[in-house]
Image (tube, grey):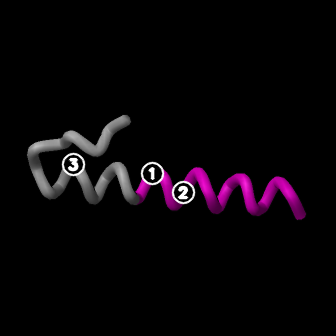
Amino acid sequence: MYFLVPSRLGLHVVVFTHLLDYYLQDTKML
């Protein structure tokens, strides 16, 4: 989806949001 980001900073933001979303989903399962 958002992997076509031209700037490296934008890519880091996308990765951070994906990790944050994964962490939130993991805490919901507990």
Res. 16 image quadrant: bottom left
Q: Is residue 13 above or below residue 4?
A: below
* Of pointers 3 and 2, the one earlier in the residue sequence: 3
Residue corresponding to mark 1: 17
- Mark 3 element type: helix
Question: Within the magenta stretch, is there residue 22?
Answer: yes
Quadrant that contains the N terminus = top left
Q: CA distance from mark 2 to mark 1?
A: 5 Å
Q: Residue at x 38, y 57 (%)?
A: 15
Callout 3 environment at 10 Å: few (<14), some (14 to 19), or many (20+)?
some
Res. 6 image quadrant: top left
**Mark 1 and mark 2 in contact (Cβ < 8 Å)?**
yes
Callout 1 environment at 10 Å: few (<14), some (14 to 19), or many (20+)?
few
Residue 10 is marked as: 3
Expressed as whole percent of the image width and height from the top left, the position of residue 30 reads 89, 64
The amino acid on which the numbered mark 2 sits, given as a three-letter code, is: Leu
Q: Is residue 8 left or right of residue 23?
A: left
Magenta residues, dominant SS class: helix
